[in-house]
Image (cartoon, helix red, strand yellow):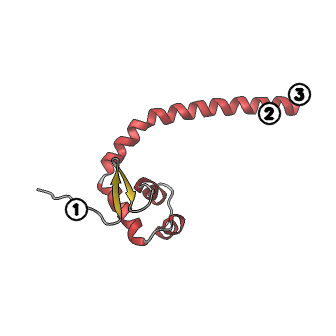
Amino acid sequence: MAIEVPIAHIEIMDGTAYIKGRMLKVRMVAGMYIHAGATIEAVMAHYDLSAGQVHAALAYYYDHLDDYAAEDDAARPLIETAKAQTDARLSEIRARYKDKKHG
């Protein structure tokens, strides 16, 4: 039987993991390191965190990777819709700008 041991520096509020004492989501810290390719030191400097806080966020993120993947999958349709709407709006703006510039 596995016993869940809390990770230092992490607190859960309303089902979301945060850096303890901060309104900074674990997902943001992990995302900067994993997806943006920042170094641990860059993440520390950007968010004013200790190495322990960054590593705790990464440990929590990797321990709950399936949960984060499910959240991403659930959000994907909303993201795609927003992207399509943004692209359409940008095309309209560019067309108006081009007409004004050349008209």
Q: Are marks 2 and 3 in contact (CB under 8 Å)?
A: no
Which element type, helix, strand or loop, lies under badge 3? loop
- Label 3 belongs to which residue? 103
- Label 2 belongs to which residue? 97
Question: Residue 50's quadrant in the figure?
Answer: bottom left
- Label 1 belongs to which residue? 5
Could you say where residue 19 lies in the image, as x and y percent from the top left? Answer: 40, 61
Q: Compared with residue 69, is residue 31 higher up or lower down, i.e. above or below?
A: below
Gap between marks 1 and 3 measured at Cα? 67 Å
Could you say where residue 65 lies in the image, as x and y percent from the top left? Answer: 33, 51
Could you say where residue 9 lies in the image, as x and y percent from the top left? Answer: 35, 65
Q: Is residue 50 left or right of residue 12?
A: right
Q: Amino acid at mark 2?
A: Tyr
Q: Mark 3 packing: few (<14 Cα in 10 Å), some, or many (20+)?
A: few
Q: Nearer the viewer, mark 1 or mark 2?
A: 1
Q: Compared with residue 15, is residue 92 higher up or lower down, i.e. above or below?
A: above
